[in-house]
Image (cartoon, rainbow, N blue to C red):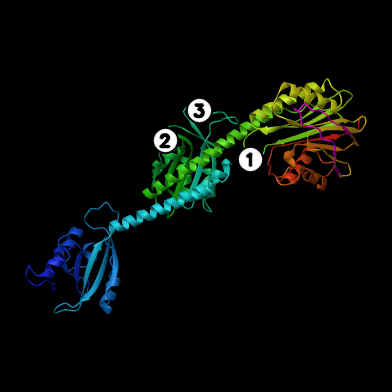
Amino acid sequence: MPQWHFPKGEGLPGRQLVEGTMAAIVVLDARLRHLYVNPAWAEISGLPASAFLGRTLGEVLPDLQRPDDVLAEVLADGQPRETTISGTTGVSSPLRQRLWRAVYHRVELPGQDAGLCGIGVEISSLRSYLDALETAHLRLALLDAVATRVGTTLDIETTCQELSDFLAPSLADMAAVGIVEEEFTSAPPPRPGFVRLRKVRGSAPAGMEWLLHQMGGPGPYIDIPRGVATRHCMDVGRPWLGNLASDDLFQKVTVDPERTRIFRAAGIHSLLIVPLITAGRPVGVILMGRAGTSQPFSDDDLTTIQAVAARAALSVDSARRYSYEHAMALELQRALLAEPRAPHPGVEVSARYLPSGRSVLVGGDWYDSIPLPDAQTLLVMGDVMGHGFQAAVTMSQYRSLLRTIATDVTGVEEILEEFDRQVAQLGLDRLATCLLAVMDPQDGTCTVASAGHPPPAVLRPDGSIDILWLPAGPPIGTGLGGYEPLTATMAPGTTLMLYTDGLVERRGTDIDDSVQQFQGLSLPADTPLDDLLDMVLARLANGAYEDDVAILAARQHQHR
């Protein structure tokens, strides 16, 4: 077939420009076969010019995308067009794919039909740079998103669910989070050399939820031995990647062959395990999987997920430490706030203590019931000002002191007077409010006195509720004294409710107005006390407590 040549003459400017340029230049006939290839294209392709002559691009370099449709349009209407050629040639390159931007013109060829002249320049580095820039922007957007979407609360379950929901499906088809368990109060500790992971939360698409329930085996924990990929990740602080993993590779993650079969049944073909590290120690681990037609994890995916894990680890660790400290604080509060003494048979007592949602700190709320002579029962509700360990310790001292005083002093006002005097003498730096009530089933009465404490509520047998408004003396610890009693009639079946201000106090609302809410409640008078307390808590606070809440209910029965 005819081939196209430059006119003879080495010094002609046209030949020098075409063969000396770094741009690739080719001339094609009407059937897109090469008539000419300049040295630049020969160097780029790794093939001599003779390898192209008389052949199409697809016949010479099959791994390059062929813009045949664009070339046909140029031949048809004579309008120049740009196009992109992508793929690989025989020349090695650090880039996974090379790109050229080319423009094609229709040219008249001597003695034959019109052909094409193509001029192209490589833009692989520019494209690579733009891809890297786009990846960096996406990574920053993900990191910004994880900062706002993960760790919105200090609840560990919620935090881990937010993390797994963030990872799947945006970065994986399935994601699960496990937390390192360091306290073993509810189960025997793991065997020596094992690390216990608590299975917390996971996310998977519809139809794959069963995988989350089965992949870790039964029970809330997984004990991980040395030599398993999950354990190795936590020990060395680096991720483990198994793309298009074989069953043998899955075994490095699951240990149990049954778990491998579960992954296969779900269509999982690639796994990525990333440790959650804070302050150089593992606090948990993320397991991610891709299934079906999803691509394996790329290097960019790995870099992005590691950055997400590093940021999310801080939120997970904060929630983890909060959950632990909160549980320990409640245990401390329960230890300090021992169960009240059993009242006389004519009085039934039930109580609740609920910490506020603001912090893990214990507080100074306390309650008590103390049997007195003549079948009377002393009921106590107190609140040491402040929060924290010192307030709780002071509360325990006040509680013990009041118990001692109540065995030697009679009358609620005299007990408060002596209580106030002794606390002031001890020099304790925390004041306390206190409400005392003596229930006397023999007389069918209740005598109350207050040291700056909210008034009690009385649920009558007919379902009506009264507030026993009484003079509120100064708080305990001022040394001022001056407490006045109030005696009310208590028919059999009447329930007295003592509480701390955390139950009714609301920001921006007068405390007396908040107390009045009690009278608007509709409560069954004969319901069990435990159920009655649940109703009061649900209707007055709706589960959102700005302060610690203590409430005690006492019901007076017919004296026998």
* Closest to the observer, 267 or 92: 92
Which residue is disc 2 drawn over? 232
* Measured Cα–Cα span from mark 1 to mark 2: 38 Å
**The magenta stretch spans which residues?**
465-486
Q: Earlier in the sequence, mark 1 or mark 3?
A: 3
10 Å crowding of disc 1: few (<14), some (14-19), many (20+):
few
Which residue is disc 1 drawn over? 358
On the picture, is 80 further left or further right than 147?
A: left
The amino acid type of the residue labelled 3 equals Arg
* Closest to the observer, 484 or 51: 484
Which of labels 1 and 3 is toward the front? 1
Which element type, helix, strand or loop, lies under badge 2?
helix
10 Å crowding of disc 2: few (<14), some (14-19), many (20+):
some
Note whether residue 350 is visible: yes
Which residue is disc 3 drawn over? 191
* Measured Cα–Cα span from mark 1 to mark 3: 37 Å
Q: Is residue 344 magenta?
A: no
Note whether residue 266 is visible: no
Q: Earlier in the sequence, mark 3 or mark 2?
A: 3
Which element type, helix, strand or loop, lies under badge 1?
loop
Residue under the point 11% across and 69% down? 13
Vertically, is 518 above or below 332? Answer: below
Residue 40 point in image, percent of width and height: 17, 61
| Quarter of the rendering containing residue 452 | top right
